[in-house]
Amino acid sequence: MTDRTRFGPAGIPPMFRLMGADLPDVPRLLREEGLDALEYEAVRWGPKPQISRELAQKLGASAKQNDVRLSLHGSYYINLAGKRDVVEASKRRLIASATAADWMGADVMVFHTGFYGRFEKDFAFKTCLEALKDVTSQMRSLGLKIKLGPETMGRKFQVGSLDEILTLNQEVENTQLVVDWAHLYAIRQGTLKKPEDFRAIAEKVEERLGTEVMRSMHCHFSKIEFTSLGEKKHHTLDEETYGPDFLMLAEVIADLQMHPTMICESPILDVDARKMKETLDRVFESKQAKV
Ligand SMILES: [Zn+2]
């Protein structure tokens, strides 16, 4: 999928908007900052794409020209574990996001699978699995090639534990593994404290889905505040009180020869994405110095 670890923001950095940038300018501005990925946020979309085909294609062309890898984050209003009408509406929203992502030439459409609600966990999960298989076959008949990226979630009532996401990747065709490290940190109540804790997750992925899937995972990263129920709020990398620590993940990326796409979800999107890139560069430099 990607040749090297890429970094970019989740959404358009506020500074770009202040500068009056149009959407197709964004990939060039990111490249000028030394970044090479962008997750387009379609998180409030309903059952139809809320971007014109023309604008989506312009963004895609500009991303290609500037070597920026595009992904798209689908609507938050999706629940594949709900009642039948909710599931059907959620499928339409996924197809809308996938259609726009296809116009852009994005590689993956990230989304939140659903909520357990009043259902048993197993039943809720099976409902999601069946719904996703149906979405995949609808996408195939529409000629949409974009990969589906169900994300690891950070709250106890959300479908999307690491195990569930690994199973979705195993069982559903045309999926891309999406690991949100902040969510894992929140749901595990801050127990990612050493590089080995990060490594154990990567190794579990490798065991279930193979080395290449592990190396090319699509990631979200930021620091995060949590409660006993999980995720509360995303924070910047400089805030000492919160975790996880990107340096630990950077060590694992280098050791396991990973080349993930790292999407930064901190409140200072591109600024922290650059900080992550600098951290990984320093890790590689210090390893080379030791050789
Ligand atoms: Zn997300």
Image: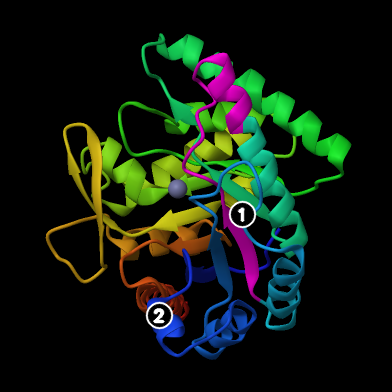
Q: Which amino acid does label 1 sit on?
A: Ser
- Occupied quadrant, residue 46: top right
On whether residue 113 falls in the magenta region, the answer is no
Q: In this view, does 238 lie above or below 219?
A: below
The answer to whether the residues at label 1 and label 2 have Cβ atoms under 8 Å apart is no
Of all residues, the one furthest to the left in this rendering is 241
The residue tagged 2 is 278
On whether residue 72 falls in the magenta region, the answer is yes
Per the image, label 1 sits on a secondary structure element best described as loop
Ligand 1 is within 8 Å of the C-beta of the residue at disc 1: no
Look at 21% across and 32% down and name the residue there. Answer: 229
262 vs 191, left or right, is right
Look at 26% across and 68% down and name the residue there. Answer: 237
Q: Earlier in the sequence, mark 1 or mark 2?
A: 1
Look at 70% across and 63% down and name the residue there. Answer: 52
User: What color scheme is it?
Assistant: rainbow
Per the image, label 2 sits on a secondary structure element best described as helix
Look at 73% across and 75% down and name the residue there. Answer: 58
The percent coordinates of residue 199 (x first, y second) are 41, 47
Mark 2: give few (<14), some (14-19) or many (20+) Cα within 10 Å: few
Mark 1: give few (<14), some (14-19) or many (20+) Cα within 10 Å: many
89 vs 7, left or right, is right
The residue tagged 1 is 216
The foreground one among 290 and 130 is: 130
Q: Which amino acid does label 2 sit on?
A: Glu
**Span highlighted in magenta in the image:** 68-90
The percent coordinates of residue 37 (x first, y second) are 57, 70
Q: Measure how far apart labels 1 and 2 are at the Cα level.
A: 20 Å
Q: Is residue 24 above or below residue 103?
A: below
Residue 26 in view here: yes
Residue 210 in view here: no
